[in-house]
Amino acid sequence: ASVEAIRKYRLQRALAAAHSMPTTEVVELYEEFLVADTDRGGDINRQEFIALLLRLSGADDASSLIGGHQEFFWKEASGGKDTISFEDYLAFHMNATRHMEAGYAATLSTLDPRWEILRTAFQRTPNAGGASRSTV
């Protein structure tokens, strides 16, 4: 295995341990991130991020997926930066999942409706083998 592959593997295992997630889920999220990183720069920009959410949800355009909330989700993911790393995307994904789970544990009126919009994208995402996995 190459040094780069070993580094990625160690990073994925460390992130999985740090977030109490299965390593396989981190690997699947990383593969999604790599597909979104069209310029292969190691980070994704706002346009790549929105395209990732569109691809995961199967929506035709951003307005049908996230309406006027694109900027909200980008700010949540990027923290005001121009690009996000995989670690940023993982944190965003986990935060979005927590918001959605909290909304179903409590009354729906307490759930920020902007987070519910992502349920479509994160509920079932394709893995590398073409099968789907549930992330919520």
Image (cartoon, rainbow, N blue to C red):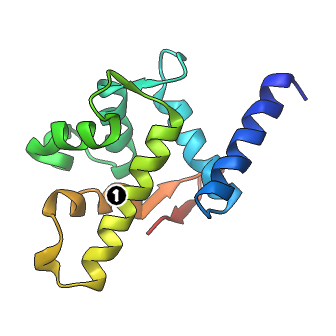
Q: Position of residue 61 (x, y in %)?
A: 21, 38
Q: Nearer the viewer, residue 31 or 41?
A: 41
Instruction: Give the vertical position of 96 relative to 31 (above or below).
Output: below
**Between 59 and 74, the one nearer to me in the picture:** 74
Q: Is residue 128 visible?
A: no
Figure quadrant of the N terminus: top right
**46 w.r.t. 67: above or below:** above
Q: Quadrant of residue 20?
A: bottom right
Residue 88, position in %: x, y? Answer: 45, 39
Question: Dot 1 lies on which element?
Answer: helix
Please name the residue that numbered disc 1 is placed on. Answer: 96
Residue situated in front as seen by the camera: 125 or 104? 104
116 relative position to 1: left or right: left
Quadrant holding the C terminus:
bottom left
| Residue at x-position 54% and y-position 61% | 132
Relative to 79, say whether 83 is above or below.
above
Residue pictured at 48% horizontal, 64% vertical: 135
> What amino acid is found at the position of numbered circle 1 in the picture?
Ala
